[in-house]
Image (cartoon, rainbow, N blue to C red):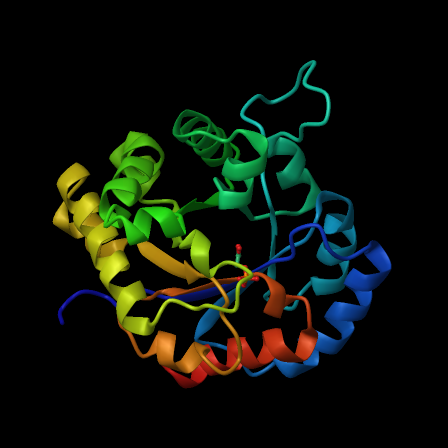
Amino acid sequence: MSQAKRRRVIAGNWKMYKTQADTRAFFSAFLPLVRGARACDIVVAPPFTSIPAAVEASRDSGVAIGGQDVFWEKEGAFTGEISPPMLVEAGCRYVIIGHSERRQFFGETEQTVAKKTKAALVAGLTPIVCVGELLEHREAGRTEEVCERQFLGGPGALTPEEFSRILVAYEPVWAIGTGKTATPEIAAAAHRFLRKCAERKFSAEQARAVRILYGGSVKPDNIQGLMAQEELDGALVGGASLDAKSFASIVNGCEAAQ
Ligand code: 13P
């Protein structure tokens, strides 16, 4: 293959877990275990209140910190929301947008995903934009239709320049927190399809360059099989990112698969 290899990313989405004290304890156990990691980027997305503790504890380690969501305005009367410049000031470099739990429980739509992504980019954050089908979609043979709709309404609503600065995460909802990982082949087929959507919307070059992470029950014992698929540019890890040892072994499994 002639194109430059896409650098892999292992990102931990802590969801609504870990206090500040838990966060400090995590990093003191985790960082020594990943000191040798060079081939993959590492991101941790704690809850908002634990971001300062995570930034402090990971300083100079090469581990980047991210938010789990963001609002699209810079400031204003939006009770409960956090803006992109606020995340940047707190030390974040990444932000997860459009997670299925936001879609399912908090009314996230393709339109809000696109607005949040654009605003995050203006502030200089790297958005990790999530897409993925429900079990009922997959069983009805509608996986591609749903992924295409989410892709076109979110990442596909960006300019080509904006699109070149995001990461996409494919997270089939039936695999999240269920222990049911997509097989490496199922994940790779969905990634190939999303790359095809990117090619149609943008260009072949942009489709080749975009990094697509897989998320859904990624664990230390399945990371190497998943990373054996060239289509997968890393992982977005929920439950297994909460434990320093298991998240480190996922990072090191990704390193070993390079
Ligand atoms: P699990 O790894 O717990 O299945 O969660 C995946 C996820 O939702 C990451 O964003």
Residue at the image point whose x is 25% and y is 55% from the top: 209
In terms of depth relative to the viewer, which is nearer, 36 or 127? 127
Corner quadrant of residue 69: top right
Residue 181 coordinates in the image, percent (x, y): 43, 68
Foreground: 62 or 8?
8
| 81 relative position to 20: left or right | left
In depth, the one of 5 and 193 nearer the eye is 193
**Picture quadrant where residue 152 is located:** top left
As drawn, which residue projects farthest toward the top? 77
Point out the image quarter for the C terminus.
Answer: bottom left
Q: In this view of the protein, which residue sits in the foreground, 57 or 100? A: 100
Residue that appears at 57% across and 81% down: 249
Can residue 117 be spotted in the picture? Answer: yes
24 relative to 196, above or below: below
Q: Is residue 133 visible?
A: no
Q: Residue at x 33, y 66 (%)?
A: 232
Q: Position of residue 142 (x, y in %)?
A: 25, 45
Q: In what quadrant of the picture does the N terminus appear?
A: bottom left
- The residue that appears at 48% across and 40% down in the rendered structure is 98
68 in relation to 232, above or below: above
